[in-house]
Amino acid sequence: MGKVLIFGHQNPDTDAIGAAIAYANLQKELGVDAEAVALGTPNEETQFALDHFGLTAPRVVEKVAAETNDVMLVDHNEFQQSVADIEELNILSVVDHHRVANFQTANPLYYRAEPVGCTSTIVLKLYKENNIAVPAKIAGMMLSAIVSDTLLFKSPTCTQEDIDAAKELAKIAGVDLDSYGLDLLKAGTNLGNKSEAELLDLDAKSFPMADKTVRIAQVNTVDLNEVFARQDALRDAMLSENVKNGYDLFLLLVTNVLDSDSELLVAGEPREKVTEAFNVKLENDRAFLPGVVSRKKQIVPQLTEAFDK
Amino acid sequence: MGKVLIFGHQNPDTDAIGAAIAYANLQKELGVDAEAVALGTPNEETQFALDHFGLTAPRVVEKVAAETNDVMLVDHNEFQQSVADIEELNILSVVDHHRVANFQTANPLYYRAEPVGCTSTIVLKLYKENNIAVPAKIAGMMLSAIVSDTLLFKSPTCTQEDIDAAKELAKIAGVDLDSYGLDLLKAGTNLGNKSEAELLDLDAKSFPMADKTVRIAQVNTVDLNEVFARQDALRDAMLSENVKNGYDLFLLLVTNVLDSDSELLVAGEPREKVTEAFNVKLENDRAFLPGVVSRKKQIVPQLTEAFDK
């Protein structure tokens, strides 16, 4: 086995990049010629964490077949969220905490998914199972990933394992969990300096549902009104992305990380699937979703079910 | 969570039944209301193991949605190898050692696959990770599954982990690994009392390849000639299964468990994929494959690649 590239999903968030760095380090300790790469540049939250712990961002790649045939995926499995040439590659392992869909291999592989809040929680287990110590800087990135994915433990995706892992990693990294955690989340809510297209691309994933392609973007904020002041421009940008990329339906989930609520902005069709899935009416293309903060647990399954009816 | 049913693939072999029994016992120890069931009756090899260790065969089911919504899969993931109503069910976990294909869920789940020779080897790890002791009878079934899947360690799918697990389980079960292992394998080679249809159904799986459906059956023997004395009747039965079930291509892999070689019998089209995949000529619908004993490692990937060209 030659070089192995390890990466998270497109539009990487802190877990996609943190888990890739952490898993690549573990693989290196186990003797694999592994390198963490990323399918995009870090967002501001991730960059805040990298800077805080003195790490550099992984090299960005779009395709990898010219470099190597062997890859390991973290924090995703669906091919449309992965590297452009994923179907040509030999997937050696997957470490993930999402549903499995649009994924297949020709050969047996190592696949470790657990229904926890963050991939980095699973990666910490793998360090322990292999009796490898987590370096302090990497512990800081893994901690940041857990804070980010669970919105400091407020997301319904969060499990006791995530909380325990975060506490353990905070000790190794030498930071105060609560104050560092809030600083990290706030670093990701600086949206004013971004164009509508940038904002829609910060944390966006595509999902095939029935015969449609649904794009679901999420942004975090401390003030919903600040985002919706740009509603018309955002809707125009979403419609333009739909045309450009063949999406049928575009959902923007704007999440208030302090109140743990979200408001949805919808562009495209069939929008009646949105009203069915969440039992809401769209007014001016918007719907308030109290208590909703998790795309994975509170948006994708409900929408998938509405499409499958 | 109510009742959880745990099962291996259709046409169950010793690992499909043994891993289901072992994983269900582990889940019960962890507080889950779990029951091992099976998607078919035990073959003679599996029945030999059940009898030897004083266990009863799991109840056979075809559909489960009327009983429960929650299931766990062992030793398979591809839906076409699973229970008939798998797409209606909530899959809580998968423990497997095969490629991933034709599998998807709406929700995150526990998925544990490792590229080892036998699911029961992974299940032993899970007992250890949870600090649960394996009961002697169940250790005997898990040991039988490893012997069966690795042909007593001769298959290229066999890893050091499988060998170590088998040795450990033999101690717990209180049997001599080599002599019990040979007895078990021979118990599965008693083909003379079976009709052609029964023989083709002993250990058969379907695989979608490109736009075709390929059926691959495997039988173990200590004498290839004994099986090929029935070649004409077998070929007729294969062609009839193709028509009845919509298979395009049927491969029967006849494996000599003493010599660790196989001979292939082919019915249906496109048979040129077989000649491409294994770089052989078919003579009288047959091809000898020296050193080939593993459908998973030496047949399916090569054939998949030929179909994907």
Image: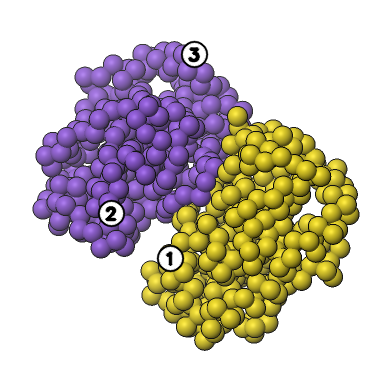
Chain colours: A yellow, B purple
Judged from this view, the residue extending furthest toward the bottom is: A174
Q: Are marks 1 and 3 in contact (CB under 8 Å)?
A: no
Q: Nearer the viewer, mark 1 or mark 3?
A: 1
Chain containing the residue with disc 2: B
Return the x and y of residue B32 as percentages of the image width and height.
30, 48
Q: In the image shown, does A103 or A200 lie closer to the viewer?
A: A200
Return the x and y of residue B99 as percentages of the image width and height.
48, 45
Chain containing the residue with disc 1: A
Sequence-wise, the earlier of marks 3 and 2 is: 2
Task: Decide: is B7 above or below B163.
Answer: above
Q: Which residue is mark 3?
A: B243
- Asked if both marks, 3 and 2, belong to the same chain, the answer given is yes
Amino acid residing under circle 1? Glu
Q: Are marks 2 and 1 in contact (CB under 8 Å)?
A: no
The circle drawn on residue B30 is 2
Mark 2, residues whose alpha carbon is within 10 Å: few (<14), some, or many (≥20)?
Answer: few
Q: In the image shown, does A249 or B75 lie closer to the viewer?
A: A249
Chain containing the residue with disc 3: B
Task: Decide: is A28 above or below B256.
Answer: below
Tell me the residue at 39%/48% (across/down): B95
Amino acid residing under circle 2? Leu
Distance between the Cα atoms at labels 3 and 2? 46 Å
